[in-house]
Amino acid sequence: MTANQVQGPAIHVQGLEKSYKTLKVLRGVDFEVARGSIFALLGANGAGKTTVVKILSTLLKADAGTASVNGFDVGTQAADVRQSISLTGQFAAVDEILSGRENLVLVAQLRHLEDPGTIADDLLDRFSLTDAAARKVSTYSGGMRRRLDIAMSLIGTPQVIFLDEPTTGLDPQARIEVWQIVKELAEHGTTVLLTTQYLDEAEQLADRIAILHEGRIIVNGSLTELKQLLPPAKVEYVEKQPTLEDVFLAIVGDAGHDHGVGTDR
Ligand SMILES: Nc1ncnc2c1ncn2[C@@H]1O[C@H](COP(=O)(O)OP(=O)(O)OP(=O)(O)O)[C@@H](O)[C@H]1O
Ligand SMILES: [Mg+2]
């Protein structure tokens, strides 16, 4: 059986509990993620989002409950789970000393893939990092690191990808680029679970949105379903003001975005 023959939801979580010493972080978390969909896990700082991601990616053991990824149990079939996933952590995992290209080649080699150089070059191109390919990552901007980090996580074409706060600290344009990449992944059948604190990110990207609060999923639904939880909108006549983000994007345009070249381009 190969990893992509498994049927059923891509992620299935039931009754998940986790404490750190006396701190009960997860008190019975339940949710499912359909294949090829984008699922956003929202929650305040400390809600337990990273804890959920760590359990699903087999980095951490749950105290109770079950979780499966790509049909494999995270507790008893950890190796199969790891074969099926990639994880982009909350803090970038790139090696500062190496160049962007070297980082990518290294991961492709670790995964025993053929022609790591070609894989690296394709990803550099796809993530607009070709011009910066030979530079040490220590000279990259935050957005470039994020893009490289996500590029590294795509090596080996995982079925399920976990993105823990993929756009935290990025400028609006770099965020939009990451969003585009995430949408493309899902269009090609990859299942994406992302955590975020940005409501607009979930709004833009997610097929389903779940809110983790006090150890449980308190809301889980599509954006439309979530909006129906609120009283119907009142009709008011107000002048539409541009958001700060609109203003930022209009003024800065594409020129303000660091695609990886030094100063001028
Ligand atoms: N290894 C650990 N030991 C003790 N407490 C921990 C550990 N890891 C996390 N915690 C605590 O568990 C809670 C949940 O942490 P977690 O990192 O899962 O939250 P989060 O939702 O990802 O938060 P953030 O939005 O800040 O990333 C927090 O109160 C955190 O301090
Ligand atoms: Mg976190």
Image: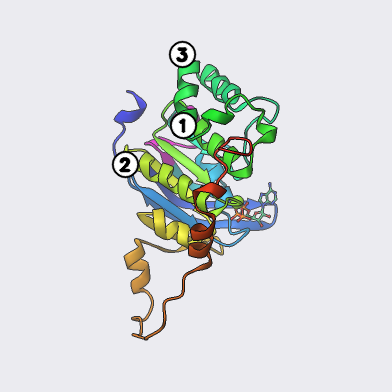
Q: Is residue 71 magenta?
A: yes
The extreme top residue here reads: 114
Tell me the amino acid under the disc marked 1: Leu
The boundaries of the magenta stretch are: 68-80
Circle 2 is placed at which residue position? 187
- Tag 3 near tag 1, CB within 8 Å: no
Q: What is the distance, in whole Å, between disc 1 and disc 2 at their CAs?
A: 14 Å
Residue at position x 48%, y 42% in the image: 162
| Label 1 or label 2, whichever comes before in sequence order | 1
* Res. 34 visible in picture: yes
- Tag 1 near tag 2, CB within 8 Å: no
The answer to whether mark 1 is within 8 Å of ligand 2 is no
Measuring from the top left, give residue 4's x and y in whole percent.
33, 29
- Tag 3 near tag 2, CB within 8 Å: no
Tell me the amino acid under the disc marked 2: Glu
Q: Is residue 30 magenta?
A: no
| Label 3 or label 2, whichever comes before in sequence order | 3
Query: Which quarter shows the C terminus?
Result: top right
Residue at position x 53%, y 32% in the image: 129
Query: Which quarter shows the N terminus?
Result: top left
**Which element type, helix, strand or loop, lies under badge 1?**
loop
The extreme front residue here reads: 264
Circle 1 is placed at which residue position? 154
How many C-alpha atoms fall within 10 Å of the one at disc 1: few (<14), some, or many (≥20)? Answer: many
Q: Nearer the viewer, residue 145 or 75?
A: 145
Circle 3 is placed at which residue position? 115
